[in-house]
Image: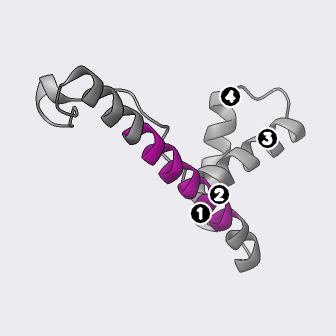
Amino acid sequence: MAADKQQLYRDREIVDKKRYQKEKAEWEAKLAKQAAKEGKPIPTKGGKKGKVKVGPQRPSSAFFFFQDDRRDALKKERPELSHKEAISVSHLNLNCF
């Protein structure tokens, strides 16, 4: 894959990472506000009781953006492929990224 095309996916990765950091900061502020209101400490990860299971969606890597685009293109080229088959075929192109 050409370097300029790779850069497009890396740029999308950077934008998604910024989105995640913004959402995470907002979520942590909301969590701290709620904990202060209830008079409890802020829940932390670690241990069964302190594990927080909700929060913002983690950022996607450049590879996942590439796979999404490739899978969509495969679906247009070969509509008979199931989702699982499209993933298998797109994995044949792993070396191009």
Q: Is residue 40 above or below residue 4?
A: above
How far from the left and from the top, in percent, is residue 21? Answer: 48, 53
Mark 3 or 1: the one toward you:
1
Q: Which quadrant: the C terminus?
A: bottom right
Residues at circles 2 and 3 in contact by the CB criterion of under 8 Å: no
How far from the left and from the top, in percent, is residue 88? Answer: 61, 40
At numbered mark 2, what does the secondary structure look like: helix, strand or loop?
A: helix
Amino acid type of the residue tagged 3 in the rendering = Asp
Residue at 63% x, 59% y is: 15
Amino acid type of the residue tagged 2 in the rendering = Asn
At numbered mark 4, what does the secondary structure look like: helix, strand or loop?
A: helix
Earlier residue among tags 2 and 4: 4
What is the C-alpha distance between the residues marked 2 and 4?
A: 16 Å
Callout 4 crowding tier (Cα within 10 Å): few <14, some 14–19, many ≥20: few
Amino acid type of the residue tagged 1 in the rendering = Ile
Identify residue for label 2. Answer: 93
Residue 18 visible somewhere in the drawing: yes
What is the C-alpha distance between the residues marked 4 and 1?
A: 27 Å
Earlier residue among tags 3 and 1: 1
Earlier residue among tags 2 and 3: 3
Identify residue for label 1. Answer: 14
Earlier residue among tags 2 and 1: 1
Between 68 and 85, the one lying in front of the other is 68
Earlier residue among tags 3 and 4: 3
Residues at circles 2 and 1 in contact by the CB criterion of under 8 Å: no
77 sits to left or right of 67: right
Callout 1 crowding tier (Cα within 10 Å): few <14, some 14–19, many ≥20: some
What is the C-alpha distance between the residues marked 3 and 4?
A: 10 Å
What is the C-alpha distance between the residues marked 2 and 3?
A: 14 Å
Residue at 73% x, 42% y is: 71
> What kind of secondary structure does the magenta stretch mostly adopt?
helix
